[in-house]
Amino acid sequence: MSRSMSKFVRSEKRIEFMKLETMLEIQSSVDGQLDNQRRGAVARLMSSDTEARELHQQLTSVRMALRQHEPAIPVPESREFYWSQIERRLQVGKMASVSAPSHSLAIWRWLAPMVGLSAVVAVIALQPFASSGLHSFQVGPGNPQATTVTFSSEADGVTIHWIN
Amino acid sequence: MSLNHDYRTAADEELVGWSRLGETEAFEELVFRHRDKIYARAMMMMRNEEEALDLSQEAWVKAWQRLHQFQGDSSFATWMTRIVINLCLDQIRRQKKNRTESIEQLEEEVGGVEHQLSIEPGNPTEGLEKDELRRRIDEAMTKLTPAHRLVLVLHEYEGMEYKEIAKKVGISIGTVMSRLFYARRRLATLLRGLQRERDN
């Protein structure tokens, strides 16, 4: 390609690009998405350029046709059949949520033995103070679902609380 | 679970309230009222009956699970439409990952040849009866690529602005504008072609 030819092609592309840009500005004006300054520029262009005016008209008519004549596409299944499929999915979802442990429950399954063990250690460690009457304390489960098992031996002077 | 509520005459908001309490009959009434709109939106985006049915039903399941999130800022139908649109977008993204765009599609992305076509004066929809126009718009929509149809549906039927579409679809505003432009020019050409067919 000669130098002058290449220059010509570049200039053609530039003109094409600019034209597309102008067309997009016209479209933005149809969609009401131009600021006042640009709206004024597009209005001036349309008053002097037939092609710009025709493009504006074409885009407007397509926009109006689409908005006012949205195709109606009804569900191709009976009400009962359509609903039965949704209902079935809802049932499956419910069963899954019942069988799968919730996040908080899963955490509690890990934490419960730890809490229980800590409680046992605390009871053993503080027992001498309790028997000497220096301190009295109460260990209670933080979770209402937790259960406690108590083992007490007066001979050994030990009381163990196991919290599940 | 029925508590002697008159579902058929109740407002959508009442039905939502009862559904939240676990009344599936109230939810069924909501499905019955809005199923065509939700299905139509899915169909408009996917152009595949099986997928549209599956996604619209999935949307209803999601809605049931998220009823507590419905604040009533928009109508129930609008809220439902957004759910189905998001599901369709996810599906389109998944499909796009598994598909190599054809050269034709890539050309369309950047405007293709449509912007170079001469602009024929006059209204491309003129003289068409309402029902015929609806049918022809539907027919013409099937001839657009999913990417162009998606932008057109979000803008024209969901009333989203360029910026909103760009954010939702994950493309630049410039791409939204060029896709929208291409889709409209293509629709105008298709509708005009149909108009000519009818006249001959």
Image (cartoon, rainbow, N blue to C red):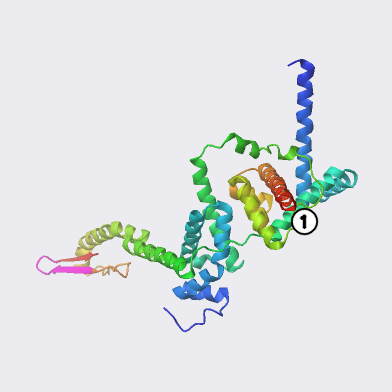
Tag 1, which secondary structure? loop
**Residue A110 percent coordinates (x, y):** 29, 56
Q: Chain of mark 1?
A: B
* The residue stretch that appears in magenta: A148-157
Relative horizontal placement of residue A49, taking residue B167 as reference (left or right) = right
* Residue at the left extreme, as displayed: A155
Q: Residues within 10 Å of mark 1 (few under 14, many from 20)?
A: few
Q: At x 55% / y 52%, what residue is drawn? A: B47
Relative horizontal placement of residue A150, taking residue A41 as reference (left or right) = left
On screen, residue A14 above or below B11? above
Name the quarter where the N terminus of chain B is drawn.
Answer: bottom left
**Residue A71 percent coordinates (x, y):** 63, 59
On screen, residue B162 above or below B78? above
On screen, residue A116 above or below B177? below
On screen, residue B109 above or below A35? above
Q: Residue B179 lies in what quarter of the image?
A: top right
- Amino acid at the residue labelled 1: Glu
**Residue B157 percent coordinates (x, y):** 65, 58
Q: Residue A97 lies in what quarter of the image?
A: bottom left
Of residue B161 and residue A81, the one placed in the foreground of this image is A81
Would you name the residue on which mark 1 appears?
B126
Of residue B118 and residue A4, the one placed in the foreground of this image is B118
Of residue B135 and residue B4, the one placed in the foreground of this image is B135
